[in-house]
Image: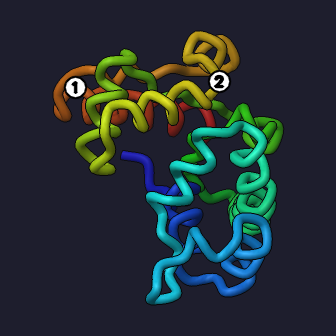
Amino acid sequence: MLSAEVFDADETARRLVEKDSQVQQRIREQFGDEVFAQTGDIDRAKLRAIVFANETRRRELEAILHPVIRETWLPQAEKFRREKKWLLVDIPLLFETDAGQYFDTLVVIACSHDTQLRRLCTLRNLDEQMAGKIIAAQMPLHVKISRADHVIWNDGAMTALERQTTLFSEYLTKRYG
């Protein structure tokens, strides 16, 4: 099995929104006090409703978050490359942010639209309409697949995904060492 560190861009975005005072201030300046709860925390549901109702607003939020996220993973990736260690970088908007240029191998983990919709609703506790808006805001799956070096299909059981990732990690180890 491949021994690697993992960087999760979605988790980093959540952490930035919840804990980074500079990011929070920029969000306040761009979106106003109405996206903040009385506790001072960002009301993620309100912010989500705003940015997925209006592409311009979504791009404004992305302009705040994406550079900070990239500033987090890019030095880490460069360090791992120098040390000849594996770093798996999970960036759902990899192609949308033009980040693919920084990686040796691009893998798309794909599933059907219905599976993606169901998972967003379940895992993020979203209604189907909001989950659909999130999916619609992304690059079409067939385009992502066409840009990938490899595709792992993730529509089935967890055991099937585990088997595919095990085979893929064996392939990477043999190919790259």
**Up-down relation of residue 8 to residue 126 (above or below):** below
Query: In front here: 92 or 55?
Result: 55
Residue shown at the point (26%, 35%) measured from the top left: 162
Report the disc number at residue 139: 2
In-front residue for pair 2/25: 25
Residue kind at label 1, given as amino acid type: Ala
Is 132 located above or below residue 12 in the figure? above
Secondary structure of residue under mark 2? loop
Q: Position of residue 118 (x, y in %)?
A: 27, 30
- Residue on which disc 1 sits: 160
Contact (CB < 8 A) between labels 2 and 1?
Answer: no
Query: Badge 1, how many Cα within 10 Å: few under 14, some, many 20+?
Result: few
Image point 69% across, 18% down: which residue? Answer: 147
Is any part of residue 152 visible from this angle? yes
Along the viewing direction, whichever of 176 and 46 lies nearer the viewer: 46
Quarter holding the C terminus is top right
